[in-house]
Amino acid sequence: MAAITPSTNTTSSWIKHKNTHQTNCSLQTIHFPKQSTIQNPPPFTVPTVRKEDSNSPSKPQWNFIQKAAALALDVVENALNVHELERPLPKTADPGVQIAGNFSPVQEQPVRQRLPVTGKIPESIQGVYVRNGANPLFEPIAGHHFFDGDGMIHAVQFKNGSASYACRFTETQRLVQERSLGRPVFPKAIGELHGHTGIARLMLFYARGMFGLVDHSRGTGVANAGLAYFNNRLLAMSEDDLPYHVRVTASGDLESVERYNFDDQLKSTMIAHPKIDPITGELFALSYDVIQKPYLKYFRFSRNGHKSEDVEIPVSKPTMMHDFAITEKFVIVPDQQVVFKMSEMISGGSPVVYDKEKVSRFGVLDKYAKDASSMKWVEVPDCFCFHLWNAWEEPETDEIVVIGSCMTPPDSIFNECDEELKSVLSEIRLNLKTGKSSRRPIMSERDQVNLEAGMVNRNKLGRKTRYAYLAIAEPWPKVSGFAKVDLFTGEVNKYFYGDEKYGGEPFFLPQDPNCEAEDDGYILAFVHDEKAWKSELQIVNAMSMKLEATVKLPSRVPYGFHGTFISANNLANQA
């Protein structure tokens, strides 16, 4: 989930990293598989596209002026690349670090049916598990952050005890245009947009747009982070664009349908972590802008896809708003210390900045408010939660309880830092009567591990929940297993994937939507064996924390981001 931030210097050239087996990181050493122990270890290869894809565009037909402009701008870009690579890239922008080992991309895979299964797939699992991730189509030519890669969805479909697998790119406007040009031309938001070269790359991109060489009017996002199933549509999302509608076929394959604006209702970007209320079926979301006011907007959709009016949220500066939370009555908006300062690029820095003078706060707003005049802000000093796992109301004390992982240093995912990263599962209480807050770690110091990426039972979202299932992000940035945490007592039950096996977000799937026991269900997780260089899907009983079944996958699944599950009934009713 997070970027790799080694403390030792590495060369800025990706080419020199192709045979690197080990990188020293801020917490400990990461061992990438040695080629002698890997079956067909992949160097960076350009992922191929299925031949039957009729949407694959041909080379653009340019006139004389466009050809001349393209040639001139290419010369400028080449000079820019040479200049940028004269000095070591930051570790958070070095592709040799960011996409090494099983963080590296893979090719698309058509559906493979009847996969080998060890154990027995539970009968209640009928449908498809889909997980998003970053998978660059082209080899980076300069800076690259793991978050910059093109979106690819990995899908495992379950039917009556058997399983199939496929993975496909989400056909974003960005990917379609770059594929037609045969190389990357859209600027990478984190890996390239830093310092003077970042400004130059933006100017270069808009110059190409002026000559009609690229079209940025239809979005520039990568759709690589979140997935949600809403109003009969699977939506692939990143916070820099509209969502993309992706359809799951009857065979278990994936087809990109369109850049989805909710029937012309959505005019702005939408963050990758919208919340779907399990009772009302409504979708709640935020949109933020890093350039102009309003910097932050809140809106919702009815279960049938009808959008509310935007509610402008008053924030003084553009702020990273990766996630938020809902309760039964309220929306909880974090206004934290990681902000955007485009002016930092002029002085040679990153536009993503940790503002130490700013005091973090959480805003509480009625979910159906038509403006932000009734919003209550509660300060929560020195708090940065990249993800919020749940929130609920406790009326007897006039408090909102928020569950999140508090990360320090706050900007360590985006900027180099010598301090060790810590991600502490915390309970944050917002007192609406006094305007005060409190915060405490949920686990004891003895049990403390970095917990990032995960969830509660989504049938309980916005309501009081006892359990959270979170990735054990150790050895950082890999995930060695997951923890089932009792949010009331702090008791922790850990499950590890196995020797030299690492995964990502644990997905909790209830056995029955109406079951009384909150933890009656299964954890689904993609796992990669770095010794055998093979991937699998593990299914773990969430009550007993015992392995139920393992699905052997036909190809490698890189470490990725967030996922969801679509039931067989919902698959049959897709738009």
Image (cartoon, grey):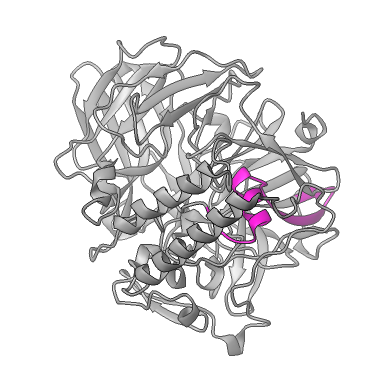
**275 w.r.t. 427: above or below:** above
Report if residue 541 is visible in the image: no
**155 w.r.t. 302: above or below:** below
Q: Residue 62's x, y, as percent?
A: 66, 50
Q: Answer with left or right where residue 85 lies relative to residue 559.
A: left
The quarter of the picture where the C terminus appears is: top right
Q: Residue 283's x, y, as percent?
A: 55, 24
Q: Residue 32's x, y, as percent?
A: 50, 78
Residue visible at 64% across and 57% down? 181
Q: Answer with left or right where residue 10 lies relative to residue 224.
A: left
Residue visible at 34% across and 51% down? 199
Residue 264 picture quarter: top right
Residue 573 picture quarter: top right
Q: Residue 487's x, y, as percent?
A: 40, 41
Report if residue 332 is visible in the image: yes
Q: Nearer the viewer, residue 521 or 366?
A: 366
- The segment highlighted magenta reads 157-185
Q: Answer with left or right where residue 443 lies relative to residue 546.
A: left
**162 w.r.t. 141: above or below:** above
**571 w.r.t. 278: above or below:** below
Q: Nearer the viewer, residue 22 or 207?
A: 207
Residue visible at 46% across and 45% down? 206
Q: Answer with left or right where residue 410 lies relative to residue 58.
A: left
Is residue 167 within the magenta segment?
yes
Is residue 531 within the magenta segment?
no
